[in-house]
Amino acid sequence: LFFGNSASITLFLDDDYYVDDISFFSALGKSSSLQSATINGEAISSSPFGQIVFGNPQDDLFDLSGTALENVAINQITLSDFGFAPFTPKTFTLSEIQVTGTLVSAIPEPSTYALMLGGLGLVGFMAVRRRRKLV
């Protein structure tokens, strides 16, 4: 991929997640010069990892712990403002983007519980009332 000054990648997730990290995997045999990116408005540096190619690790990890995005439920990730190592071409060979996180579980609001209890109370009241009519 060639990244100019205005390039961005948007990932749409299938549900809301607390994202822990985002891994960029380069194509086999290609080293990476990606050092930073802006993720949903937060500038984050990457940590290189993976197989060493031409003296450089080939993959990049963006760890979101300790950032403003650490405990935020998101279902869309926008990557932009890519930063590259000095004196390297502004290109990146990408074979996979892996997002690691925890699915946000649905927690009912207190008003939902109040409506449910009110409904159960009405059903109970109707059952008692019917029983009295039958006797």
Image (spheres, rainbow, N blue to C red):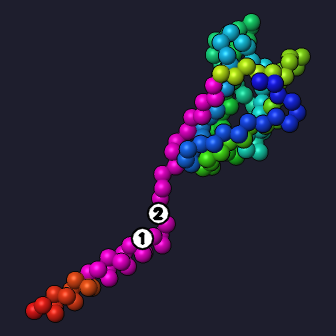
Q: Residue 50 appears at what percent x and percent y?
A: 63, 16
Q: Residue sitting at 38 percent across and 79 percent down?
A: 118
Mark 1, other Cα within 10 Å: few <14 / some 14–19 / many ≥20: few
Q: Residue 129 appears at what percent x and percent y?
A: 22, 89
Q: CA distance from mark 2 to mark 1?
A: 7 Å
- Residue 49's place in the image compared with 69, above or below, is above
- Residue 123 seen from this side: yes
N-terminal-most mark, 2 or 1: 2
Q: Residue sitting at 16 percent across and 87 percent down?
A: 131
**Left or right of residue 16, residue 83 in this image:** right
Q: Which residue is mark 2?
A: 108
Three-letter amino acid code of the residue under disc 2: Pro
Residue 133 within the segment the image draws in magenta: no
Residue furthest left in the image: 135
- Residue 32's place in the image compared with 10, above or below, is above
Nearer-the-camera pick, 107 or 16: 16
Q: Residue sitting at 64 percent across and 29 percent down?
A: 97
**Left or right of residue 14, residue 7 in this image:** right
Magenta stretch: give its range: 96-124
What is the quadrant of the N terminus in the image?
Answer: top right
Give residue 80's mark: none
Three-letter amino acid code of the residue under disc 1: Tyr
**Left or right of residue 134, residue 125 in this image:** right
Q: Which residue is mark 1?
A: 113
Residue 121 within the segment the image draws in magenta: yes
